[in-house]
Amino acid sequence: MAVGVFDSGLGGLTVLDAVARRLPDVPFVYLGDNAHAPYGVRDAQDVYELTTAATQRLFDAGCDLVILACNTASAAALRRMQESWIPRDKRVLGVFVPLIEALTERQWGDNSPPREVTIKNVALFATPATVRSRAFQRELAFRAIGVDVEAQACGGVVDAIEEGDLILAEALVRSHVDALLRKMPEPQAAILGCTHYPLLQDVFQAALGPQVTVFSQADLVAESLADYLGRHPEMLGTGQERAFLTTGDARRVSDRATQFLHRQITFQSA
Ligand code: DGL
């Protein structure tokens, strides 16, 4: 029994931490495609090819269920994968829907018609590819009416985090928040629509101000995974080993992961 967690790089570790805390008995296999990060500047075909290759690697490691802990992959590739690629006995889940269900005050899997919700003005921070896909607005429109979304493509932030340059990453976050606030001066809520961004959640919150509720995905995804596995225990898969795999330089990636998560994490080559 093992569940796969995939991201283009280090960001999915924010999700992995939350799911491992929520489900301590489940062995998780993490795969970071650090050799090809960032995904957010790639086109949809490229993201699809990289995401299917990485997902296959996790199936091969004994995972029947894979979480795409990457909004860019969830936005640009997941729907196409579900339509034509995923084998019948496997499942791949994205990170978008739990977040939008929380924002629109819905229980998991509540597919009733869209309705008015409390939050009317939402700031979305995401990678250029996620913003371009408009997947967030599409999922939101299925569930809520009358919500105004202003999206800010946060170019450069993922690269800076992957390079370990936190000073640059923080400066970029402040300037992206400024740009968003010029377009929407009073958002009620902000979505961190990239799993790298919770590593800088304090910087987002400080730049936005205390009156803005910041939604990030890790805990929401953990709850929804626990619920899913409660209903589908057969999807736990055959693998038994916990592992951190990377397509990049394992030593370098281990150092960065240890720096960000403040505990020793040792990656091996995928
Ligand atoms: N963590 C990925 C996401 O959630 C980052 C994508 C990238 O590599 O640009 O979108």
Image (cartoon, grey):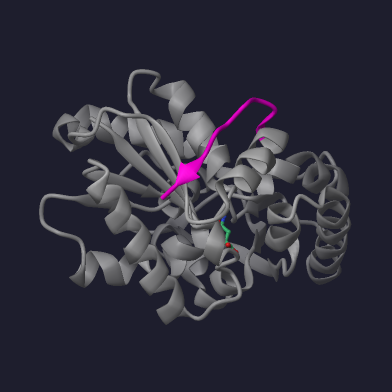
Tell me where residue 67 appears, x and y as whole percent: 37, 47
The residue under the point 58% across, 31% down is 265
Quarter of the render that holds ligand 1: bottom right
The boundaries of the magenta stretch are 261-270
Closest to the observer: 180 or 142?
180
Membership of 182 in magenta stretch: no
Closest to the observer: 156 or 109?
156
- 45 above or below 36? below
Q: Residue furthest left?
A: 88
Tell me where residue 4 appears, x and y as whole percent: 34, 42
The residue under the point 41% across, 31% down is 223
Res. 112 in view: no
The residue under the point 21% across, 44% down is 64
The residue under the point 81% across, 52% down is 165
Tell me where residue 115 appears, x and y as whole percent: 43, 56
269 lies left or right of 49: right
Number of disc labels: 0
Closest to the observer: 102 or 32?
32
Q: Quadrant of residue 55?
A: bottom left
257 lies left or right of 204: left
24 lies left or right of 132: left
Q: Quadrant of the N terminus?
A: top left
Q: Most prominent secondary structure in the magenta stretch?
A: loop
Membership of 262 in magenta stretch: yes
Res. 70 in view: yes
